[in-house]
Image (cartoon, grey):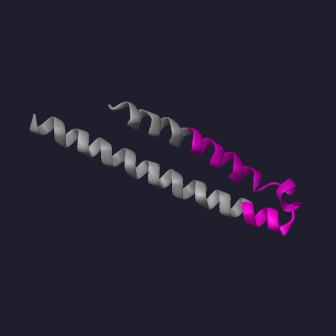
């Protein structure tokens, strides 16, 4: 597997851990006590993390499929 794909896999794993921590925080009373602006911005941040994670997942799978196709033709 190419180095950049491994880096993407590591990046996705780290991102998913941060995403889970943020989600867990958003279920706490501490989060509930934040201002509406802070909650709004954290919601945007969480959504962006979800999109980024999904994009990494798709890119990783794309390169895995390309790699499998390349091996079949050799």
Q: Residue at the location (38% across, 30% down)? A: 3
Location of residue 46 in the rendering, given as x and y in whole percent from the top left corner: 65, 57
Q: Residue furthest left?
A: 74
- In this image, 36 relative to 47: left or right? right
SS assignment for the magenta stretch, majority: helix
Taking 54 as reference, is 73 above or below it? above
Q: Give the quarter of the figure containing the N terminus.
A: top left
The quadrant where residue 29 appears? bottom right
Q: Give the quarter of the figure containing the C terminus.
A: top left
Residue 40 part of the magenta-drawn span: yes
Q: Which residues are magenta?
A: 14-41
Q: Residue furthest right?
A: 33
The quadrant where residue 69 appears? top left
Q: Nearer the viewer, residue 4 or 56?
A: 4
Location of residue 13 in the rendering, given as x and y in whole percent from the top left corner: 53, 39
Residue 45 part of the magenta-drawn span: no
Q: Residue at the location (26% across, 45% down)? A: 65
- In this image, 63 relative to 46: left or right? left
Q: Residue at the location (40% across, 35% down)? A: 4
Count of numbered marks: 0
- In this image, 1 relative to 56: left or right? left
Location of residue 28 in the rendering, given as x and y in whole percent from the top left corner: 81, 54
């Amino acid at each position: 597997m190419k180095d950049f794909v491994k880096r993407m896999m590591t990046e996705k794993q780290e991102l998913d851990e941060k995403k889970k921590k943020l989600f867990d925080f958003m279920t706490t009373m501490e989060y509930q006590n934040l201002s509406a602006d802070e909650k709004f911005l954290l919601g945007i941040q969480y959504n962006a993390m979800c999109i980024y994670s999904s994009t990494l997942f798709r890119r990783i799978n794309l390169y895995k499929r390309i790699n499998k196709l390349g091996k079949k033709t050799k």
